[in-house]
Image (cartoon, rainbow, N blue to C red):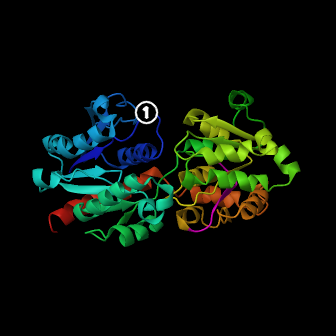
Amino acid sequence: MKIAIDLTSTQKNKTGIGRYMLGILIGLQQIDRENEYYLFAQDDDMDGFGIYAPNFHVVPVDSKILRKTYIRILWEQFVFPFRVKKTGADVLHCPNYTMPYLSRLIDRKLAVVSTFHDMAYFLHPEYLIGWKRKMFCGYIKQTAKSCDKIVAVSHNTAKDSLACSKPRNKDIEVTYLGVDEAFFDTPAASETIRAKYGIPEKYILYVGTLEPRKNVAGLIKGYRELPDEIKNEYKLVITGKKGWYYDEIFSTVDSDPSLKENVIFTGFVDDEDMIPLMKGATEVGYVSFFEGFGLPVLEAMASGVPIVTTSGSSLSEVAGECGYLCDPSDPKDIAEALERGIGDSENKVEGALERAKTFTWKRCGEHTLKAYEDAVKFRRGQ
């Protein structure tokens, strides 16, 4: 097979979709030396995916034309299909909900695989801007109707995708994400790394974008409910870049002198520092209202650090019985879980570490390759 993969939505600082695609390429290169891969990537990020296998070829795309949303959409719909056709691809993987719908007219033999990460656009409109939500809901429904195979990152997302998008091919491939092996092996953060961000020796860590559905304000309110002696001993460290509607996060801290003293914002932290910072944390708090998978939960488990996360949805699907679960809408319940997680009072870390070892990018690559093969068969009516 010839396989085209759209990497153009990812940027140098790999977050979200970028980390997902980086992991898939790690897995695919481990298992596949037979098929030919054509990776469409921004020309200023061609070296950012760790490509080493001879059957993987990077196809540069001018990053300047992708910076504005409307130009990106026009390029994806009216230029990209022709570039894919030139490769002679049998299947195209679009990892971010959408696809070039014109490809159906340009190359009727081309099979298309699309990854659905979650159905927040349908299920949680309160976390999204109105016009953007309507636009993406339309894209997702059209993709589900047009593509030959959907990949979902969890069983929870697969279930939601069937209900919300009503796909043409209802046989959805679930591909759990993997975890970077460095989370198992890297030492905890040194004093030098902690000093770089103003972080003390004992801290509770949050990793992720600052946006409403991540419930960072809820985590802070839960932390506020902890006894003063715990807050004074364990600072709350919030890492991640600003997303949108983040004002409540900072106003919650600014309105309480004890929080201003004990909550630390670092901004974006790259993996080189993030992995040792996670390894050195007392626990990780990740109490999102809604996630398709929740990679920080898995990374905390692999780091040997207690994880406090949300009951229900994919977060508890990933954590299994190995997390300290709570109601994300209840600050007192969050506080109780945080307090139980400190010192791993229920001895969950060892089981979490073993569970994390089952989530590998190789396994993710195997399921993804199966999705490509299934899509081609579905397209050809086999």
- Residue linked to disc 1: 12
Classify residue 271 as left or right of residue 368: right
- Above/below status of 10 relative to 64: below
The residue lying toward the viewer, choosing from 181 and 243, is: 243
Spot the residue most to the right. Answer: 229
Say few, some or many: other residues with alpha carbon within 10 Å of mark 1 (under 14 / 14 to 19 / 20 or more): few
Residue 149 in view (yes/no): yes
Q: Residue 269 appears at what percent x and percent y?
A: 58, 35
Classify residue 76 as left or right of residue 233: left
Q: The C terminus is located in which quarter?
A: bottom left
Residue segment shown in magenta: 303-312
Looking at the rendering, which quadrant does residue 147 occupy? bottom left
Q: Tell me what residue is drawn at x 70 percent, y 64 percent.
A: 330
- Specify whether residue 131 is painted magenta: no
Report helix, strand or loop for mark 1.
loop
Classify residue 281 as left or right of residue 228: left
Residue 347 in view (yes/no): no
Looking at the rendering, which quadrant does residue 378 occupy? bottom left
Task: Give the dominant element type of the magenta stretch: helix, strand or loop.
Answer: loop
Amino acid tagged 1: Lys
Classify residue 10 as left or right of residue 376: right
Badge count = 1
- Specify whether residue 308 is painted magenta: yes
Q: Residue 271 appears at what percent x and percent y?
A: 55, 36
